[in-house]
Image (cartoon, helix red, strand yellow):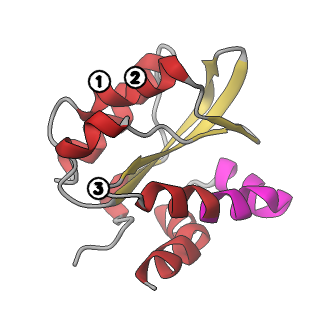
Amino acid sequence: MSELLEPRAVRLAESAAGRDDAIRRCGAVLVEIGAVHPGYADTMLDRERSISTYVGEGVAIPHGTLAGKDLVERDALAVLRFPDGVDWGGEPVTVCVAIAARGDGHVELLASLAEILLDEDQARELREATEPGTVIRLLGPIQEETKR
């Protein structure tokens, strides 16, 4: 089985015109790595319009709606860093951790990610990462948790 977070799904020098553009970029990476079918980004946008996926510390966690689960081939993460920041409904976001999950896997992923973001040092390191290896090391515990 593929890793939850592949190095090719980590993009650390992205730019976006706004929140919706950032979400579309996240969806495009998930399509590119074969985790989701085209159209998944639309369900991510639907989710965002119903409830913000901004979680604090400059991080958003865009993911699809329940209806989008049919477009998911496999559970995966994509991490996109926007060094110049993106306006996320009035909050500045520099990192998006996009989630594709077939079942209820996103709940576990969100909980594991929240633990990392609650650690001020780890959250800062994630926001300032310039190497994919740093992101993979920081999010490694999430991959371990979901394998259990």
What is the total number of numbered labels drawn onto the structure image? 3
Q: Which residue is mark 3?
A: 102
Q: Is residue 134 magenta?
A: no
Give the amino acid at mark 3.
Answer: Arg
Give the amino acid at mark 1.
Answer: Asp
- Labelled disc at residue 62: none
Q: Nearer the viewer, residue 133 or 5?
A: 5
Q: Residue at x 68, y 50 (%)?
A: 128
Q: Nearer the viewer, residue 78 or 74?
A: 74
Considering only order in the chain, which callout, 1 or 3, is on the residue closer to the N terminus? 1
Q: Which residues are magenta?
A: 112-128
Q: Residue at x 34, y 54 (%)?
A: 101
Q: Quadrant of residue 57?
A: top right
Q: Nearer the viewer, residue 115 or 68?
A: 68
Instruction: Report if the CB atoms under discs 1 and 2 are less than 8 Å apart.
Output: yes
Q: Nearer the viewer, mark 3 or mark 1?
A: 3
Q: Which residue is mark 1?
A: 42
